[in-house]
Image: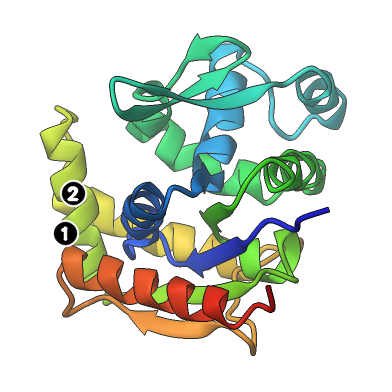
């Protein structure tokens, strides 16, 4: 059986990993797996159903029947949660605020990892998140860790939210990113970390096109090393 080529991209919130993964996947015809969107989806579900995320029994009920799909419509990837299009809803500030503590819960991560690995069975894949290289795909063909200056990350996220019509201050966005960094790195289960076999990529001074071309070249190089 042919083994699919897996690219795992880890990194901090707002570092550019989503943009890179999405664009490179499109250019190379890989499946783009936005694992962050999956955690946002379950967070959105918790908020919508008014569930106490600290109640393990209530969480188990939600996770048992959860279904997340990524479907292309009009050239854009849309995220569906149990049949509902939640693409825009999972980017709202209220989800942003809660996603890190929800993501730190062991049973949530275990379920998401299970679903994420299923996607890798279907096609060549680029996955991005915060434990992709260390936990989800430790045997990925290529691992990349994306970093970026804190204030630059906040500027990018602030610009993104403003363009989508959300009313939020730069100071609040910066505070949220600092909090997410701390929670991601200090959580007990699957903390964010750079693995020894990951290629380090700092995007602070790079344009999107430069980032994309660099990662695309790395993938093509690593693919060429695989024995036919």
What residue do we see at 51% from left, 65% from top?
9
Under tag 2, what secondary structure?
A: helix
- Distance between the alpha carbons at the discs numbered 1 and 2: 5 Å
Of the pair 45 and 203, the residue shown nearer to us = 203
Q: Would you name the residue on which mark 2 appears?
A: 158
Side of 15 where 223 appears, left or right: right
Instruction: Give residue 135's position: percent from left, percent from top.
Output: 74, 64
Categorize mark 1 by other alpha carbons within 10 Å: few (<14), some (14-19), many (20+): some
Res. 131 in view: no
Q: Is residue 48 above or below residue 96?
A: above
Instruction: Give residue 19's position: percent from left, percent from top.
Output: 31, 54
Quadrant of the rendered image containing residue 67: top right
Side of 206 where 46 appears, left or right: right
What is the basis of the colouring in this image? rainbow
Res. 112 in view: yes
Q: Would you name the residue on which mark 1 appears?
A: 155
Of the pair 210 and 163, the residue shown nearer to us = 210
What residue do we see at 76% from left, 55% from top?
2
Q: Mark 1 touching mark 2, by CB under 8 A? A: yes
Q: Is residue 71 above or below residue 104?
A: above
Of the pair 187 and 219, the residue shown nearer to us = 219
Of the pair 86 and 78, the residue shown nearer to us = 78
Side of 103 where 33 appears, left or right: left
Instruction: Give residue 90's position: percent from left, percent from top.
Output: 43, 28
Q: Is residue 116 above or below residue 223?
A: above
Side of 88 where 221 appears, left or right: right
């Amino acid at each position: 059986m042919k083994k699919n080529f897996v690219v795992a991209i880890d990194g901090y919130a707002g570092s550019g990993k989503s943009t890179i993964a999405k664009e490179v996947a499109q250019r190379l015809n890989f499946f783009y797996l936005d694992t962050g969107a999956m955690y946002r989806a379950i967070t959105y579900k918790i908020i919508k159903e008014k569930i106490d995320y600290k109640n393990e029994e209530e969480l188990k009920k939600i996770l048992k029947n959860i279904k997340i799909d990524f479907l292309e419509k009009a050239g854009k990837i849309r995220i569906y949660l149990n049949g509902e299009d939640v693409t825009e809803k999972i980017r709202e500030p209220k989800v942003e605020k809660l996603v890190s503590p929800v993501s730190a819960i062991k049973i949530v991560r275990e379920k998401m990892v299970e679903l994420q690995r299923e996607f890798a069975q279907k096609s060549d894949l680029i996955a991005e998140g915060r434990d992709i290289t260390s936990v989800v795909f430790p045997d990925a063909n290529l691992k990349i860790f994306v970093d970026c200056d804190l204030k630059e990350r906040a500027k990018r996220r602030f610009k993104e939210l403003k363009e989508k019509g959300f009313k939020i201050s730069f100071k609040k966005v910066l505070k949220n990113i600092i909090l997410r960094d701390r929670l991601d790195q200090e959580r007990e289960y699957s903390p964010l970390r750079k693995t020894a076999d990951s290629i380090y990529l700092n995007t602070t001074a790079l344009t999107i096109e430069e980032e994309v071309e660099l990662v695309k070249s790395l993938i093509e190089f690593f693919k060429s090393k695989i024995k036919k």
